[in-house]
């Protein structure tokens, strides 16, 4: 299965593209085809989205071809809903960044590419859309591609592809377009079918955040979703943050092995104190418990982030108090310059330092995505105000 997120500025054609892809790939129900008046409406499920003609929330659509299964994440392009785009891209294997052939990269398009890079999305494909409005000119496609390449290089995005399309008319979406004979690559659907699968979470270091404890007679089972890696019966593990060493005595189904992202329950060889929020990791590659974190944060709160502010930090199944110690800099998404600031406003991306009230078992995000990510929660409103990636 391939998870694909769409990104880009408002009105670049993301919802129209997904509607066209589903329609031309024959992935719609008969009643949807019969009532098809606007391709974008296929993914705009909220009433406000249909009335305003914009995407507000992330829409998820599943479809399959004979070669592969897909989950499409239609992310909003409006600056006000950047937080939702970050949510949609956080679990994607590939990001489709749409760019209007007439306008080129906008500030919001740049912001979305920066977020895709920060979130570690493995591959990015730039779709130069609305080619019909520039006469299907190769020169205009090349100019936009150069602009995207320059930004991608500075962001460290190396797995980058380009496809010229017209989502409205279907050019190079499912079938190759006769209007652009100068383009020798595959149309979008074929490109997605051939895209390499993302590196499996099962190959990362083993991390089992404990969600609940199940008692069965005299035996306790420690259950949760295996965030990364593989656990086997007999493995030597450490219970964090306590640091107690023990061994996996059994897996719930009687098997010998469980791999991420499976939900599992394990029994331990020793009677140790383990509860929700603890982490089981293989002894030889366990993370060190930390109370000070350097992280990149995408700010999602209406109230700005300021040094000294207090939040709840949720990391896997563990929630601890946290204090924003300092804001080191903000990333200018237009120039990619790092500028000193006193606060982070809505949609800002910046590097911060946090101190937590209790230890968290965090990995660098580029090593283990699941345990390198966290969210910040406003204590008063219980709203998610920040999404962070540990440095």
Image: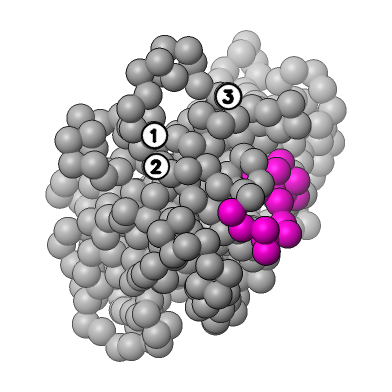
Q: Residue at x 20, y 30 (%)?
A: 47
Left of 57 or right of it: where is 257? right
Q: Earlier in the sequence, mark 1 or mark 3?
A: 3
According to the picture, the residue beneath numbered tag 1 turns out to be 39
x, y percentage for residue 220?
62, 23
Q: Nearer the viewer, residue 111 or 174?
A: 174
User: Label 2 belongs to which residue?
Assistant: 15
- Residue 321 in view: no
Mark 2 nearby-residue class (10 Å; few <14, some 14–19, many ≥20): many
From this viewpoint, is residue 160 visible?
yes
Residue placed under numbered mark 3 in the picture: 26
Q: Residue at x 66, y 46 (%)?
A: 176
Q: How far is disc 3 from disc 2 in space, using C-alphas?
A: 17 Å
Quarter of the picture containing the N terminus is: top right
Pointer 3 or 2: first along the chain = 2
Picture quadrant of residue 182: bottom right
Pinpoint residue 252: horizontal percent, then vertical percent.
71, 20
Give yes or no for residue 181 being in the magenta stretch. yes
Q: Is 99 above or below relative to 30?
A: below
**Above or below 88: residue 302:** below
Q: CA distance from mark 1 to mark 3?
A: 13 Å
Residue at 72%, 57% in the rendered image: 185
SS at mark 2 in the image: helix
Image point (24%, 42%), residue name: 53
Q: Are marks 1 and 2 in contact (CB under 8 Å)?
A: yes
The image's colouring method is one colour
Residue 174 pos. (x, y %): 62, 40
**Span highlighted in magenta in the image:** 179-196
Separation (CA) of disc 1 from disc 2: 7 Å
């Amino acid at each position: 299965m391939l998870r694909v997120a769409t990104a880009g500025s408002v009105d670049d054609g993301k919802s129209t593209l997904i509607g066209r892809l589903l329609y031309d790939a024959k992935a719609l129900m008969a009643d949807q085809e019969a009532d098809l008046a606007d391709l974008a409406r296929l993914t705009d499920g909220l009433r406000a989205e249909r009335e305003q003609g914009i995407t507000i929330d992330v829409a998820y659509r599943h479809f399959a071809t004979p070669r592969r299964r897909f989950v499409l994440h239609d992310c909003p392009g409006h600056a006000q809903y950047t937080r939702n785009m970050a949510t949609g891209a956080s679990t994607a294997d590939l990001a489709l960044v749409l760019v209007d052939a007439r306008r080129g990269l906008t500030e919001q398009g740049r912001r979305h590419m920066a977020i895709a890079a920060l979130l570690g999305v493995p591959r990015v494909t730039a779709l130069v859309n609305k080619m019909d409005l520039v006469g299907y000119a190769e020169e205009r496609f090349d100019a936009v591609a150069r602009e995207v390449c320059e930004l991608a290089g500075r962001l460290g995005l190396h797995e980058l592809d380009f496809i010229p399309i017209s989502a409205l008319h279907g050019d190079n979406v499912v079938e190759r377009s006769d209007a652009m004979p100068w383009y020798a690559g595959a149309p979008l659907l074929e490109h997605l079918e051939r895209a390499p699968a993302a590196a499996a979470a099962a190959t990362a270091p083993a991390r089992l955040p404990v969600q609940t404890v199940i008692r069965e007679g005299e035996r306790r089972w420690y259950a949760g979703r295996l965030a990364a890696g593989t656990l086997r019966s007999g493995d030597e593990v450490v219970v964090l943050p306590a640091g107690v060493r023990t061994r996996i005595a059994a897996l719930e189904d009687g098997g010998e092995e469980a791999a991420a992202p499976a939900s599992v329950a394990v029994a331990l060889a020793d009677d140790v104190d383990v509860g929700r929020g603890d982490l089981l990791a293989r002894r030889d590659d366990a993370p060190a418990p930390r109370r000070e974190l350097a992280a990149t944060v995408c700010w999602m709160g209406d109230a700005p982030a300021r040094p000294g502010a207090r939040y709840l930090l949720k990391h896997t199944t563990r929630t601890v108090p946290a204090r924003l110690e300092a804001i080191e800099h903000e990333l200018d998404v237009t120039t990619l310059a790092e500028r000193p600031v006193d606060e982070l406003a809505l949609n800002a991306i910046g590097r911060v330092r946090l101190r937590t009230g209790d230890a968290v078992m965090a990995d660098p995000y580029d090593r283990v995505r699941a345990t390198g990510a966290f969210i910040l929660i406003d204590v008063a409103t219980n709203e998610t105000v920040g999404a962070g990636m540990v440095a």
